[in-house]
Image (tube, rainbow, N blue to C red):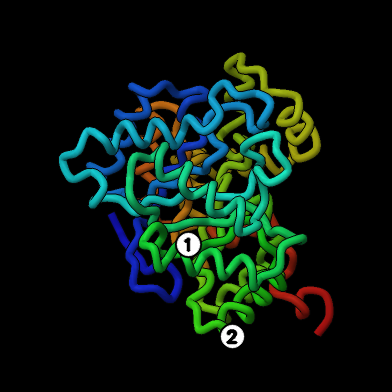
Amino acid sequence: MNYTHLGRTGLLVSRLGLGTMNFGDVTDEATAHLILDAAVDAGINLIDTADVYGGPQSPDMKQGYGTSEEIIGTWLAKGDGRRDKIVLATKVYQPMGLGPNDRHLSAYHIRKAVEDSLRRLQTDHIDLYQMHHVDRSTPWQEIWQAMEQLVRDGKILYVGSSNFAGWQIATAQASAEKRNFLGLACEQSLYNLTARTVELEVIPSLRHHGLGLIPWSPLMGGLLGGVLKKIEAGHQPRKRLADQIKQLRPQIQAYEKLCADLGESPADVAAAWLLHQPAVTATIVGPRTLEQLTSSLRTLNLTLSEQTLIALDEIWPGPGGEAPEAYAW
């Protein structure tokens, strides 16, 4: 396993992170524990979850709600030094109840949310506490005051963001610097071969402020995972994925042919492409089974040639570079 610093911090994280959104939803607890054991044995130390993961992400559908954290908690409770082997990351923002303050980033909700996550995770601290989305209604002074208190109390170590725009990252950091606070350590964004908008302004902002980038959905919900071959084998995609396939079929065909010519699976090529991007710290893989995790590890040993990277850019062109040069001068 290769490790790298999380942005400008001294914290080392594995280049692959284990995403656990499927835990408690399509992956039962016993299988999830096997996946966690195998991930740690393979050297993965970044374990990523969220308070809302584990089932339908809606507070009026309690079944499975928050179960991902609970499953990780029962795994940690087995002891044997598990907690000291991982960098534990979770998130706050999403609705966790029907009350008016059961969501977003008020100091009130942050305080309650972190205590609930700690209880479900059966630990005394969270290594990376990520804001799942920007809160347009709460001032940064309030958010940072709440986060600083959690750091002082030893309940969290680092703060991250997710789904932030470049200017929102800059605003957050400017406010943190006024308080002599580290601020954000990383951003978790949608980033893959088909979704490259972050190259315009998010990635330049991260580079300027010294933040790490952790892409989520490296396979774009299965679109980059050999979907046409699966359809040929009789698999029927869900409507949203089917609509994307219809729109992008020529590109998908070219992509899957390129992967076949390389002798590599489309899923491995998609994840490897991300790890070839200089801004990327680690990419999240979200296996539903132990076999899928084992397959994902192949990515770490897959080196893409310059010719292959150029071919991938031709099939899946980005926005043209960074702003404003991508559209002006």
For the C terminus, the image quarter is bottom right
Q: Looking at the picture, how far across and down is residue 101, in whole percent?
A: 68, 46
Asked whether disc 2 touches disc 1, contact meaning CB atoms under 8 Å apart, the reply is no
Residue at (37% x, 36% y) in the render: 72
Give the amino acid type for the residue marked by disc 2 in the picture: Lys
Q: Tell me which label, 2 or 1, sits earlier in the chain.
A: 2
Q: Is residue 214 above or below residue 55?
A: below
Q: Nearer the viewer, residue 327 or 206?
A: 206
Q: Quadrant of residue 81?
A: top left
Q: Residues within 10 Å of mark 2 (few under 14, many from 20)?
A: few
Q: Eyeballing the image, is 9 above or below 51? A: below
- Give the SS element for disc 1: loop
Q: In the image, which is nearer the foreground, mark 2 or mark 1?
A: 2
Q: Secondary structure at mark 2?
A: helix
Q: Is residue 317 above or below residue 74?
A: below
Which label belongs to residue 320? none
Q: CA distance from mark 2 to mark 1?
A: 35 Å
What residue is pinned by disc 2? 178
Which kind of residue does numbered mark 1 sit on? His
Mark seen at residue 276: 1
* Farthest top residue in view: 234
